Image (cartoon, rainbow, N blue to C red):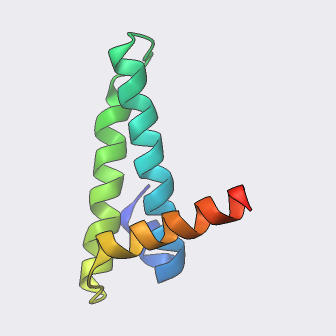
């Protein structure tokens, strides 16, 4: 994902993409531990994409990014469970 692509997304879309990428990074780390990761460079690429999104969010003046992420996760878990 390029910076231009990231900047084109709305703030809500960026938060959703950030959540998706963090989950993907967790899955990649799990695969790396169990030695099932086929492309180790995916770890670095995913980390860089997360950093790009965080940078754009901070440029837009977003505050409490982590707290918003936890709030979105709670809403998503309620939708899945309920």
x, y percentage for residue 46?
A: 37, 44
Residue at 51% across, 53% down: 20
Residue 4 in view in this figure: no
Q: Residue furthest front?
A: 82
Q: Residue 11's spot in the image, x, y percent? A: 46, 81
Q: Which residue ends up furthest to the right in the rendered image?
A: 82
Decide: is 63 above or below 29: below
In this rendered view, identify the residue nearer to me: 56 or 27: 27
Q: Nearer the viewer, residue 8 or 75?
A: 75
Residue 57, given in percent of the width and then of the height, sits at 32, 78
Task: Identify the residue shown where x is 40% and y is 38%.
Answer: 26
Reply above or below: 54 against 80.
below
Q: How many marks?
A: 0
Residue drawn 28% across and 37% down?
Answer: 44
Identified at 39% across, 12% down, the residue is: 34
Left or right side of 16 for 2: left
Image quarter (top left, top right, bottom left or bottom right) of the N terminus: bottom left
Residue 79 position, x and y percent, is 69, 64
The answer to whether residue 59 is visible is yes
Question: In the image as oriented, which residue stretches furthest toward the bottom?
Answer: 61
Quarter where residue 61 is shown: bottom left
Q: Quadrant of the C terminus?
A: bottom right
| In the foreground, 62 or 2 | 62
Vertical side of 20 occupied by 63: above or below: below
């Amino acid at each position: 994902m390029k910076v231009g692509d990231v900047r084109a997304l709305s703030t809500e879309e960026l938060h959703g993409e950030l959540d998706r990428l963090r989950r993907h990074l967790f899955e990649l780390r799990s695969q790396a531990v169990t030695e099932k990761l086929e492309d180790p460079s995916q770890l670095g690429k995913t980390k860089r994409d997360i950093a790009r999104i965080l940078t754009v969010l901070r440029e837009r003046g977003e505050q409490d990014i982590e707290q918003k992420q936890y709030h979105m996760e709670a809403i998503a878990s309620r939708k899945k469970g309920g």
